[in-house]
Image (cartoon, coloured by chain):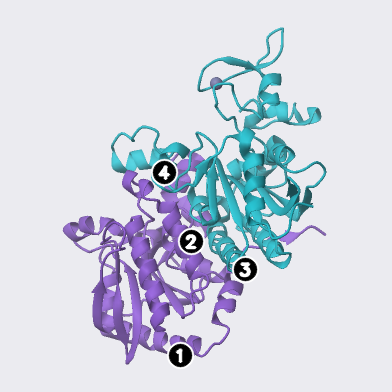
Amino acid sequence: MSMPYDRVKLARDNKRPTGLDYIRNLFTDFVEMHGDRYYGDDPAIVGGIARLGENPVTVLAMEKGHTAKERTRRNFGAPHPEGYRKALRLMKQAEKFGRPVICFVDTSGAYCGVGAEERGQGCAIAQNLLELSTLCVPVISIIIGEGGSGGALALALADRVWMLQNAVYSVISPEGCASILWKDSAKAAEAASSLKLTAEDAKSLGIADKILSEKELGKQEFYCRIRMLLARQLQELEEDAELVSKRYDRFRKLGTGEESQ
Amino acid sequence: MALINFLKPKNQLEEGGRTAAPVQQDAGEPEKKCPNCHKEIPLSRLWANHLVCPCGYHFRMKARQRIQMLADKDSFQERDGSWKRGNPLGFPGYQEKMETAQVASGEEEAVICGTARLGGYPCCLFVMEPYFMMGSMGSVVGEKITRLFEYAVDHQLPVIGFTVSGGARMQEGLLSLIQMAKTSGAVKRHSDAGLLYIAVLTDPTTGGVTASFAMEADILLAEPGATVGFAGARVVEQTTQKALPKGFQKAEFVLEHGFLDAIVSRGSQKKVLTQLLSLHAKGGPI
Ligand SMILES: [Zn+2]
């Protein structure tokens, strides 16, 4: 078993499949949709409509890019408010047409910039959480690399949250945690252990439902396996008349503490 | 920060904690230096003015103090006050940090929830506590706020919330993060029930609290000069390597960019909130 900080490094490896790799390999007929209809289009979140097998689905993916040039263009997968608003627009569209939503989460976090703040980064994430909590179609989120804090959660308030075996999901980066708590970012490895951010941790906390093996990662067998899992899961969720209230209960029971006496 | 001493019961004054350094005193009346106008203001004068300097600077205020200022006399009834704290991930040093925070704030956790009347109008009220780990949100904070919104739905009550927070509490890891989802779900149910939620953002409201229930209200108010944002200003500066614009993330800046309904100074808050409650009330005051 590797150390949690090794997982963080693996999750950040730019050779890992990114959001667009999943879109290209899992779905057919993908049509990309751009723009938030308010301000711009955020290349850090890719959205569109595609088929999973025969069925139309709405797909949202954070995209980090592989090469230096791509990574710069995608802002290293750190979304601006426009990305979250585009995602919300496409989720509401999915609801209108009765399509399930599948999200691929891979970000170190929502972008920390002047423009992002000026255009309401916090507000954009909050609106996604609010609307996702009652969206009337099935939502499945897969954390494929980094699940960085609120910026990741904005696409992960879902009926099912799955994580790749070496993906991580955390309230703060281990470096950030170490520098705030111990004024020493070199203690990131220690912080990574304390934060309980691995897929196994998230599963044991009830935050992730399933861990996806990385056997044959990026190969056709790998995508084929995930495609089958998604199809089966969507069928189950689509037949569930209490989908929305179960989604509420799923998050309601997490981290409750307890009443004294 | 030394002002905290003045706000606490006397028997807690000598206890430790970063916020509990003794107030500087001359022979005369204790004074507090205003970071805005740099004048020494007598504490009694600050007190009489809800901890607002004559120059308009709003000092940080303890949650109980706010409740006393806002709620009609004897109307506040606390809910879930004894919710038990824990260290669910066994995070090193967390238990000690919470104990220090308890001494510094005189509170069990970073939010106080309950029911109250404002100008005769019944409502649910939550007020976050700056002196408990800077109002950070862990399981207990998220749970208490969620329970308050659920109670408000069951009793058809509006919710008024005063936020102050450094964000999600990192010592509870993912369990803190997930409170953003949990509270958002509860706010949405309250909203879908046609009920009113007013948030008053106070200094500072940042991180995971901004990105969840703070920004989800029907009506968003803020105190003058309050920092309201998602990322910390220092992080933004480090990330972008550029100087920040003037007034960045201050309430006035956020209002100008369209993310607040109004800035309301402390002295007017009760009046404005009562007015808003009355504009949404089906019945009159009781
Ligand atoms: Zn002053």
- CA–CA distance between discs 1 and 3? 30 Å
Which x, y percent locates residue A191? Answer: 48, 51
Query: Which image quarter holds the N terminus of chain B?
Result: top right
Q: Is residue B15 left or right of residue B228?
A: right
Please give the residue where the numbered disc 2 appears in the rendered image. A197
Determine whether B191 is above or below B276 in the image: below
Kindly report which numbered mark, 1 or 3, lies closer to the viewer in this rendering.
3
Query: Within 10 Å of the Cα at label 1, are there few (<14), some (14-19), or many (20+) other Cα atoms?
Result: few
Q: Amino acid at mark 2?
A: Leu
Q: Residue most toward the left?
A: A69
Q: Is residue B144 visible?
A: yes
Name the amino acid type tagged 3: Ala
Badge nearest the viewer, 1 or 2? 1
Residue placed most toward the observer, B108 or B70: B70
Residues at marks 1 and 3 touching, judged by CB atoms closer than 8 Å: no
Chain under label 3? B
Chain under numbered label 4: A
Of A257 and B32, nearer the camera is B32
Chain assignment, label 1: A
The structure residue drawn at horizontal position 58% and vertical position 55%, both measured from the top left corner, is B172
Marks 1/4: CA distance? 45 Å
Q: Colour of chain A?
A: purple
The secondary element bearing badge 1 is classed as helix
- What residue sits right under mark 3 in the picture? B193
- Label 2 Cα crowd, 10 Å radius (few <14 / some 14-19 / many 20+): many
What mark, if any, has residue A235 been given in the picture? 1
Sequence-first tag of 1 and 4: 4
The yes-or-no answer for disc 4 within 8 Å of ligand 1 is no
Task: State how far apart marks 2 and 3 are (Cα).
Answer: 36 Å
* Local secondary structure at mark 3: loop
How far across and how far down the image is residue A135, in percent? 48, 74
Tell me where residue B235 appears, x and y as whole percent: 39, 42
